[in-house]
Amino acid sequence: MNSFDKIQAEDFEDLFENAPCGYLSMWPDGRIVKVNATLCDWLGRSREDIIGKRLRDLLNVAGSIFFETHFAPMLRMQGFFHEVALEMVRADGSHMPVLANAAERRDAEGNLQFTRLTVFKATERRQYERELVEARAAERAARQRLEDMVSSLREGMSEQVAILMEEKRNSELKEQFVAVLGHDLRNPLAAIDAGASKLLRDGGWTESTPTILHLMKNSVSRMGGLIDNVLDLARSRLGGGIALDLADNRPLQLTLELVIEEIKSVNPDRTIDVCFDIVAPVRVDHDRIAQMFSNLLGNAITHGMADTTIKVSCMVDETGALELSVANAADPIPPEMVELLFQPFHRGQVRNNARGLGLGLYIASEIAKAHGGWIDVVSEPDETRFIFRLPAQAADAAQERARID
């Protein structure tokens, strides 16, 4: 190599490492394989701390959710995205507003080789957006003060006029809620619609169509699951807990078997060992128990060793006391992590292919509490076991609460 070639090689290396923007490359499974010094410096992280992670691990909670439900499917369908606003988390926990561009690199057969992503700081732009939000908040505050003044004047009005004004205000709030809901769901739905229009309607049926349909279906399923979990979170936080319906008298074993069959249908390679000993009926909300059991069983599928058996046990004694357990072989959970398992948005140290908001165990715990029971965790070197316990008197109390509600 002559001197000119050496200078060129050094320049290209310097251009990558010290560019005025961040660079990173990701394998097809989403793991980061290369990152430049600029992005490491911006985030205050070492290269070793970033390599092997996924992009969502470097984002805040809201950005991670939006990336998984919107931009990741868009990237898979069209091969790129431009000027995506995200917030990356620095090593000290502070947030760094950025704009990101991404593009996939594929071989001649269309197989994904890697994904390149560039990151630009957007601090000034985000500051402008914050100032705009603050101006709108000031406007809302002024409007609230005006409404307070109107409220004080309304006391001297007739009852009929007061009712009409209240109905008008409620109508405006409902319209605002619908507008916000439509705005927040428009982008991910538009991405799915674009894939259907561009690749299915215009392109016709091709060899890649089943893959596209599978990706679109997964996106819709993830969106539905996220929405269901967020609604349950809102009910548990704002609505006084999860409501129960104890009118269903089906056998509990039938409900649990249906959940097991559903899990097996999407995980045919996993072995589930089942033991039922139900000697007395128990009054529970079967839909909620199925949801809780599905979350616990799905957690065992995600975190358990793939070549080991998952053990399910359900016992109900003569008094109606219930004990439902799900066990899987896995590395033991550190004691300091056990206390965090049932907190919302906590995902712990999950596998690289795990997705979701970290609400599954939280909602399972809330369902247990709504019934008057609780979930214990026993994590030993050779096995981790989640146990739902429902004393007989707790089941009676849950039935009475459901009747009153």
Image (cartoon, grey):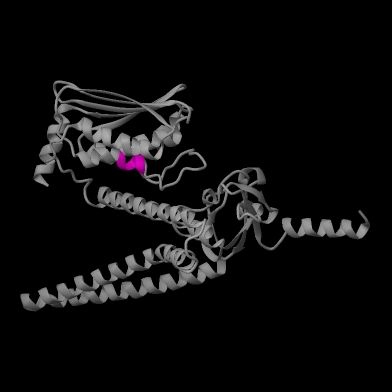
Q: Residue at x 13, y 23 (%)?
A: 319
- At horizontal 30% and vertical 32% (from top left) the residue drawn is 375
Main SS of the magenta segment?
A: helix
Does the rendering let one see residue 339? no
Drawn side of residue 241 relative to residue 102, left or right: left
Number of numbered discs present?
0
Looking at the picture, tell me which residue is in the foreground, 402 or 31.
31
Quadrant in the picture for residue 261: top left
Name the spot of residue 90 as percent of width and height, x first: 57, 52
User: Which residue is at the front of the view, 222 or 62?
Assistant: 222
Q: Residue at x 25, y 77 (%)?
A: 146
Compared across the picture, whether 32 is left or right of 176 comes to: right
Give whichever of 9, 96 is nearer the camera.
9
Residue 110 to residue 81: above or below: above
Residue 389 rendering spot, x and y as whole percentages: 25, 28
In the rendered image, the vertical position of residue 120 relative to residue 395, given as above or below = below
x%, y% of residue 148?
Answer: 22, 73
Residue drawn at point x = 10 percent, y = 73 percent: 163
Where residue 135 appears, as percent x and y from the top left, is 41, 74
What's drawn in magenta, residue-wise?
360-365
- Position of 229 compared to 135: left or right? left
Q: Is residue 316 visible?
A: yes
